[in-house]
Amino acid sequence: QVQLVESGGGLVQAGGSLRLSCVASARTFSNYIMGWFRQAPGKEREFVATISWNGGTTYYADSVKGRFTISRDNAKNTVYLQMDSLKPEDTAVYFCAARWGGTSKIPIDYAYWGQGTQVTVSS
């Protein structure tokens, strides 16, 4: 069982930055693929970014490519999402998730989820 706890959300003006963190309880954190997803009101949960076990491979949604950066620190059991040049359409609850196996952009592939952290970008 893996428990994930996100933090770092908040209210920011358009063009600003936030860094989300997700701390995992797993003893073998480095074995897990980690991902970030988001869900806006009335919309389905969507993929944002994912990172391989050693950080060597990353994938991003087209909507955030060039603005967001996913990274991980296995010594701290933590995955990060640096979000720059934020836009109002980035407003959503952001979730981190963990899975075994390869990277995936599909929410149902992830077995473990955090409770989410709210990000609100004002125009």
Image (tube, rainbow, N blue to C red):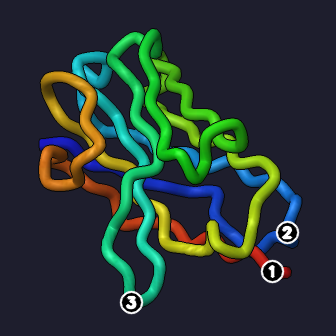
Q: Which label was assigned to residue 14?
A: 2
Labelled pair 1, 2 in contact (Cβ < 8 Å): yes
Residue 65 left/right relative to 109: right
Crowdedness of circle 2 by 10 Å Cα count: few (<14), some, many (20+)? some
Q: Which label was assigned to residue 122?
A: 1
Q: Name which residue lies at 61% across and 40% down.
A: 65
List x then y, in percent, for residue 51. 41, 27
Residues at marks 2 and 3, CA–CA distance in whole angstroms: 22 Å
Q: Nearer the viewer, residue 107 or 119?
A: 107
> Is disc 2 placed on a helix, strand or loop?
loop
Q: Amino acid at mark 2?
A: Ala
102 over 86 or under it: above or below? above
Q: Name which residue lies at 33% across and 58% down.
A: 114
List x then y, in percent, for residue 84. 78, 48
Q: Name which residue lies at 64% across and 64% down.
A: 9
Residue carrying label 3: 42
> Is disc 3 placed on a helix, strand or loop?
loop
* Mark 2 / mark 3, whichever is N-terminal: 2
Q: Amino acid at mark 1?
A: Ser
Q: In the rendered image, which quarter is residue 107 located in?
A: bottom left
Image quarter where the N terminus lies is top left
Crowdedness of circle 3 by 10 Å Cα count: few (<14), some, many (20+)? few
